[in-house]
Image: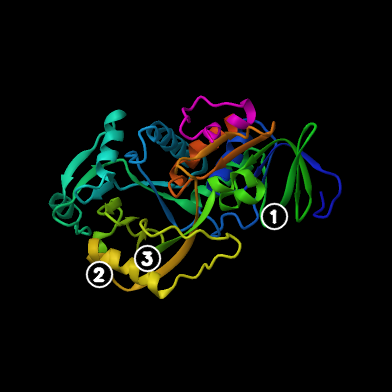
Amino acid sequence: MSDTGGTDDRYDAIVVGVGGAGSATTYHLARRGFDVLGIERYDIPHAMGSSHGSTRIVRKAQHEDPAYVPLVERAYELWRALERETGRDLLHVTGSVHAGAPGTDVVADARRSCEAHDIDYEQLSAETVNERFPGYDLPTDFEALYQPAGGFLDVERCVTAHVEAAHAAGATVRGRERVLDWAETGDGVRVRTDKGRYAADELVLTAGSWTGELLPDLAEQAVPVRALMAWLQPERPEWFTPDRFPVFMIRDGAEGGYGFPVYDVPGFKFGRSSDPEEVVDPDTMNREPNAAEEQLCRRFAERFFPAGAGPTLALRTCLVSHSADEHFVLGRHPDYGAVTVGAGFTGHGFKFTSVLGEILADFATAGETDHDVAIHHIDRL
């Protein structure tokens, strides 16, 4: 169809938003034989939402809730399958460290999830962590949990791999095309963009921080929050390589963060996870970090990873869409007969996107899934 055409092109399914979850959903629908159209308002991949910044943590120790463990184990299987299918290296194992001050619950919660699902782990003192991984400098009273299967995903390559595999399975993906509105019709849905009109039997909305624009009733379950990622030059670069530096989650009262070894771009990468939520408009937010934010990041690195706290190399903003209870929002929308939603991933969803694509494809094609998503199901709302 031409970009200004009048007659709707017809598909089995349309996926709106081709980031982490949307690219995986497009792939899983296409490999099941469905004629799929993915629509993305920005480039594929792009840096305007949540699926960018070189790396995202993947881990089997799920401090959020034991219910996440079966999903992440399936996600690992699907990431490895996608690597074999596309020939791309996506998942890099470094081990993962959960660490916290006395009285914080991040270590106990990670341990509870591991024990509930027979995931192997080591309980370590701060001294042992610092000796084994010299890039770390945890306070002596901290406790820690090490899980050897943790690591990171190459985030942009993951999106690219899902889109490549979706193309190979027959999907169509259109970038730089903004959805203006959509509506249910007597035989499915109609989607209107700034370049054309499309029709389909099913609609899957994986629009991240723009979910509220397309589904106003879910605006409170996909609240756009501005976050910051930092890259600093290590003073001892040999301590921050993937074979010597596990990914980490740290909590100490009001301060916390997460981070990665050096990979793909210069610098030790980390982010603070303890700042007050800055709710923003995703279209007008300030995407340029400021000096005060840089100093907060540097203070975090200087406290816990002083050998990594050399000159600042890069600061980048990121959009995270928060749900009210910090669990995902998945399922068939109860008010529409042909609409499936994946939203509210709250900053810890990317590692799951391989299995989220499978789950959302289940909902779109069968109205249900065999995966246990009770804590994430849209019906809880």
For residue 51, side relative to residue 38 (left or right): left
Rendered location of residue 69, percent (x, y): 37, 34
Q: Residue at x 62, y 35 (%)?
A: 333
What predominant SS class does the magenta segment belong to? Answer: loop
Which residues are drawn in magenta?
Answer: 363-381
How far apart, in angstroms, are the residues tagged by discs 2 and 3? Answer: 13 Å
The answer to whether any part of residue 118 appears in the image is no
Q: Amino acid at mark 3?
A: Trp
- Residue 365 lies in the magenta-colored region: yes
User: Looking at the rendered structure, which numbered label has been put on residue 299?
Assistant: none
Asked which secondary structure carries label 2, the reply is: loop
Mark closer to the chain start, 1 or 2: 1
How far apart, in angstroms, are the residues tagged by discs 1 and 2? Answer: 44 Å
Figure colour scheme: rainbow
How far apart, in angstroms, are the residues tagged by discs 3 and 1? Answer: 32 Å
Cβ atoms at labels 3 and 1 below 8 Å apart = no
Residue that label 3 marks: 231
For residue 136, side relative to residue 174 (left or right): left
For residue 278, side relative to residue 367 (left or right): left
Q: Residue at x 14, y 54 (%)?
A: 131
Q: Amino acid at mark 2?
A: Glu
Rendered location of residue 261, percent (x, y): 32, 57
Q: Amino acid at mark 1?
A: Arg
Neighbor class of circle 1 (other Cα within 10 Å; few <14, some 14-19, many 20+) is: some
Rendered location of residue 15, percent (x, y): 65, 42
Return the residue nearer the eye: 348 or 156.
Answer: 348
Position of residue 88 relative to residue 281, above or below, is above
Q: Quadrant of residue 240?
A: bottom left
Residue that label 1 marks: 178
Residue that label 2 marks: 235
